[in-house]
Image (tube, helix red, strand yellow):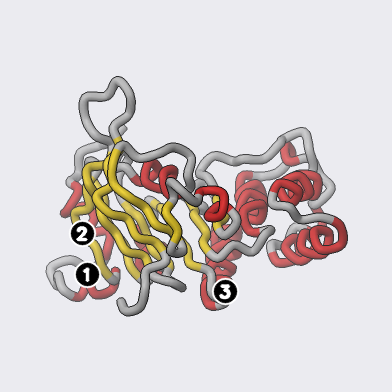
Amino acid sequence: MTGHPMIEIRDLVKIYKGSDEAAIKSISIDIYPNEIFGLLGPNGAGKTTTISILCGLFPPTSGSVQIGGMDIHNNLNEIKQIVGVVPQEIALYPTLTARENLVFYGNMYGLKGKMLKDRIEEYIAVFHLEKFANKLISRYSGGMKRRVNLLAGLLHKPRILFLDEPTVGVDVQSRVVILEYLKEINKSGTTIIYTSHYMEEAENLCTRVAIMDQGTIISQGDPKKLVAERPEFKNLENIFIHLTGKDLRD
């Protein structure tokens, strides 16, 4: 990749209080503008911890992170203005409607009045939620909740979008809608950092991937090139199993 990275991670380490082992062990990654970068790994590999640090949810034990040329330790408030976060857990209020949830999150991002109203209506249409926008989130299917969860992180049109398992547990139709929209906003200039357990999805979606296990990066590159370089493996999933093993993870 050429040019200046959008995100620079250097020697990142995270040791949780009371733990004898680091959750992240000195990882370094460059993520460039307009990439869809996949962070892949089995349970406990360190993916969510890495994403959480990049989002400013908690500090690393050591190492550095720069986002958009700004140091995350010194410029966290400025960085929060250019990033969107879609967590793995559904971050919606079940006793509010989809539209009410979106107004709430839009206000958090500083959006008001007609701009917010127009943007909510635009996204409700994109995600095919027109018939359900005034229904309580508690009455939504899993796929519909995922769509609204993603929408909430997109309202302020961030330059960088962090997605932690955005399609886990959703129906095929919702997955197609979500992935097609991610491709569309990426073409328009949004850099996406994405974790997933779905290897076929990552292979088709991502420009580059990093495979993590036990807090370290064990392979990194263009997923199609990674497969081409290992003709004994048919796809990224085969490579993933080869690198991380077949043992079940908690």
Q: Residue at x 25, y 37 (%)?
A: 248
Q: Residue at x 57, y 62 (%)?
A: 178
- Marks 3 and 1 sit apart, C-alpha to C-alpha, by 25 Å
Asked whether the beta carbons under mark 1 and mark 2 sit within 8 Å of each other, the answer is yes
Q: Which residue is mark 3?
A: 184
Task: Check residue 62 in the rendering and tell me which mark sits there, or answer none.
Answer: none
* Nearest to N terminus: mark 1 or mark 2: 2
Q: What is the x, y in percent for residue 171? A: 56, 53
Amino acid type, callout 1: Leu
Q: Residues within 10 Å of mark 2 (few under 14, many from 20)?
A: some
Q: Locate residue 222, reporting x and y percent.
A: 29, 71
Give the residue displayed 28% in from the left and 41% down from the top: 62
In this rendering, the answer to whether 8 lies above or below 141 is below
Question: Residue beneath label 2, please?
Answer: 219
Could you give the CA–CA distance between mark 1 and mark 2, rounded to whole angstroms?
Answer: 9 Å
Figure quadrant of the C terminus:
top left
Judged from the image, the secondary structure of the residue bearing numbered disc 3 is helix
User: Which of pointers 3 and 1 lies earlier in the amino acid sequence?
Assistant: 3
Q: Is residue 169 above or below residue 112?
A: above
Please name which of the two marks, 1 or 2, marks the residue nearer to the observer.
Answer: 2
Nearest the viewer among 182 and 77 is 77
Near-viewer residue (64 or 39): 64
Q: Residue at x 53, y 55 (%)?
A: 79
Rendered location of residue 211, percent (x, y): 26, 55
Is residue 171 shown to the viewer in this render?
A: no
Q: Residues within 10 Å of mark 1 (few under 14, many from 20)?
A: some
Q: For mark 1, give the secondary structure.
A: helix
Q: Is residue 228 left or right of residue 78?
A: left
The residue identified by callout 1 is 226
> Distance from label 3 to label 2 (Cα)?
27 Å
> Which amino acid, mark 2?
Ser
